[in-house]
Image (cartoon, helix red, strand yellow):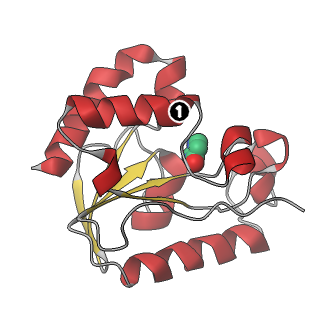
Amino acid sequence: MPRIVKGSGPLDAKIVLVGEAPGAEEEYSGKPFVGASGRLLTAMLGSVGIDRAQCRIENVMQVRPRGNNFSEFYLDGAKRRSPGRELVAGRARLLRDLGAMNANVVIALGKEAIKTLAGKPNIIQWRGSIIPTPFGKVIGTYHPAGILREYKNRPVAEIDLKRALE
Ligand code: URA
């Protein structure tokens, strides 16, 4: 059975960050964003003056996808148009939890988060925009795992995080 990785940090945080799903290290420790992506996230937050400990950290999915591949949560695989039952439930759970939180801003890390939080189809066009939603303002930026692959995106993501802080 895959291990469930719940959110971490204060439930009344002003800033909530939402990722995709736990990876191996998260599954092992039971905490979100503790692996390489998490270390980068902590560093980026720190460099714009956000203390990670003051933030709530959530994921769209609380279980690790098979093969670490988020497409496994879709019925049509890499096309990612038709979410499976587990993903539908995961999205509903996240939106319900956010509804009970009352954050000032919710930061969507990557495409799956911005899709779930704001119904937007990609992060490239939507990152940096402030999107009003029923549970607060959403601002999207690149997922740290993507930044590890494409490091030139780090300064852009830091601009987005700074905007969220302001
Ligand atoms: N990537 C995510 O999206 N979430 C985690 O918790 C870890 C890595």
Name the residue tied to disc 1.
37
In front here: 118 or 45?
45
Q: Can you say whether 59 is above or below 151 in the image? A: below
Specify the quarter for ligand 1: top right
Q: Can you say whether 4 is above or below 142 in the image? A: below
Position of the N terminus by quadrant: bottom right
On the image, the x and y values in percent for residue 117 come to 43, 65
Q: Which residue is depicted at the point 67% across and 55% down?
A: 30
Q: Which residue is depicted at the point 52% across and 73% down?
A: 94
Q: Secondary structure at mark 1?
A: helix
Q: Which residue is depicted at the point 24% across and 44% down?
A: 128
In front here: 53 or 60?
53
Q: Residue 70: in sight, yes or no?
A: no
Q: Amino acid at mark 1?
A: Ser
37 left or right of 157?
Answer: right
On the image, the x and y values in percent for residue 64 come to 74, 52
Q: Can you say whether 89 is above or below 164 in the image? A: below
Q: Which residue is depicted at the point 15% across and 44% down?
A: 163
